[in-house]
Image: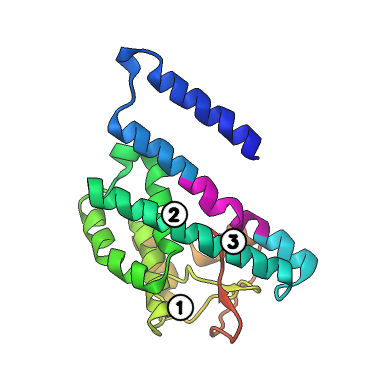
Amino acid sequence: MVASFAPAMGARIAMLCGDTASRPTVYDTVALELRVIDYADQRYRLQMDDTSRKYGYNSKQVKGLFKKMAMVDSMNLRKVDSLINKYGWLGPDQVGSDGDATIFAVIQHSSLKSQEKYLPLMREAVKDGKAKANHLALLEDRVALGEGRKQIYGSQLSFPGYAVLPLENPDSVDIRRASVGLEPLGVYLKECCNIDTVKFAPLPSGSAPSPARK
């Protein structure tokens, strides 16, 4: 995967730098940096399900993945923090939809303290059209649970098990999800986790929100 990623990156840089007319803009360069950050963000998360099934959730292999994820998440946050301090909030018009999604993912995967720091900034970015309402909804849910409140949109799931963590008014969750551009909860669970039945559960000891992108 690394080998196939690097040539594509090299080709993109070569295309951007090939002549004066196509020299990269500042935001082209930032978008490329965000592609590298996204790869790092997802690298170990994409291994989690298979590793957990093979060795068990409490295995040293899974614990090793969580340790690697934490190290990468910390490095990625420093990079994104530096970009935001330098350029302000970077929206799709500047870094593309993928770059925008990467900024969100890095913040979503950071500590509660960092999530609380960026939540007001992301709310303003949504108002200004620089961030997506559905991304903000997921961050709102993550912060609510971290602060001991119930989530609003049902985006946060236990891992393992993929049960919906404490949720306000489950009967009306799909109305709230639709208001921010999210699919119905049942569809989300089927698409992300191949779960046919929606299960609601408190956050049990030793469990955690799913390490997936959302």
> Can you tell which mark lies on residue 171?
1
| Amino acid type, callout 2 | Asn
Residue 105 in sight in this render: no
The residue shown at (31%, 48%) is 83
Answer with the quarter of the image where residue 167 lies: bottom left
Within 10 angstroms of label 3, few (less than 14), some, or many (20 or more) residues? some
Q: Mark 2 points at which residue?
A: 76
Marked residue nearer the N-terminal end (2 or 1): 2
Magenta-tinted stretch: 37-47
By secondary structure, the bulk of the magenta-drawn segment is best described as helix
**145 sits left or right of 87 in the view:** right
Marked residue nearer the N-terminal end (3 or 1): 3
**187 sits left or right of 197 in the view:** left
Q: Name the residue under label 3.
A: 68
Say which of 153 and 26 sits in front.
Answer: 26
Answer with the quarter of the image where residue 157 lies: bottom right
Say which of 79 and 151 sits in front.
Answer: 79
